[in-house]
Amino acid sequence: MIVGNGLVANAFREYDRDDVVFFASGVSNSLETDQAQFDREENLIRKTIEENPGKIFVYFSTCSIYDSSKNASFYVNHKLNMEHLVASDCEKYLIARVSNAVGMGGNPNTLINFLVHSISGNSVVKAHIDATRNLIDVEDVVKITMELLQENKINRIVNVAYLANYSIVQIITIVEDFLGKKAELELLKAGQSYSIDIPDVQDYFRRKNLQDKENYLSGILKKYYQNYLS
């Protein structure tokens, strides 16, 4: 059973299982402050748990929890509360804290969607030079999650993220190389960086020979953004 219609939910369509609830619905905007939006997700989680007793409940949370600049945000506090709800009310669960997933479509305001669109359209990009982001192919999110389930690694919280962060400048350079076009940049001395510990998933990237971070991101761009090439 898949709950949701966004990037992560759609990536799981062909992996749907009767014994698992993949819950990838709810608040996705990290700047959201409308309590009604958070209440809607909580009510849906409670209803879904109640209607699916005995199933493994996979809840997709966020690695933004580790971002000190967002510790007091409505979004992060809500995600932590939902994690506690799932862990408390489900006999079998897996909480996957996902970093910045990249794939086909999704929110147009996600970092890679924004950069590709802005650079290809000659828009000025304001880059926070002290900021870093952890980018992961949404297909790797799916494969890692399915491996965890197959190995019965449940009733735990797992960080599902890439081996290393990228600086914003690194990301922009890789996008520029892919598009064959220079960005109109406004560099700002600002931004946050935080590390993500991934002991449960780091071996996945080694087995798949995905350790080269520049090649990894270049491969993601080639997979999902070919339509931006002239």
Image: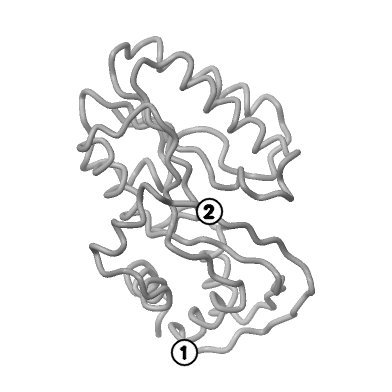
Foreground residue, 175 or 160?
A: 160
- In terms of secondary structure, where does tag 2 sit? loop
In the image, residue 64 above or below residue 204: above
Tally the numbered discs: 2
Check disc 2 and report the residue beneath it: 196
Quarter placement of the N terminus: top left
Q: Residue furthest right?
A: 189
Locate residue 167, reporting x and y percent. Answer: 59, 72
Left or right: where 187 falls relative to 160: right
Q: Quadrant of residue 212?
A: bottom left
Q: In the displayed structure, would residue 47 be above or below residue 205?
A: above
Kindly identify the residue that appears in the image at 69 percent across and 39 percent down.
Answer: 32
Amino acid type shown at disc 2: Ile
Rendered location of residue 190, percent (x, y): 77, 68
Q: Which residue has dot 1 on it?
A: 180
Mark 1 Cα-neighbour bin, 10 Å: few <14, some 14–19, many ≥20? few
Asked whether 179 or 63 is in front, the reply is 63
Residue 107 point in image, percent of width and height: 52, 52
Of 192 and 32, the residue lying toward us: 192
Q: Provide the secondary structure element on which disc 1 rests.
A: loop
Estimate the x, y position of residue 204 in percent, counting from the top left. 29, 56
| Cβ–Cβ under 8 Å for marks 2 and 1 | no
Q: Is residue 119 above or below residue 8?
A: below
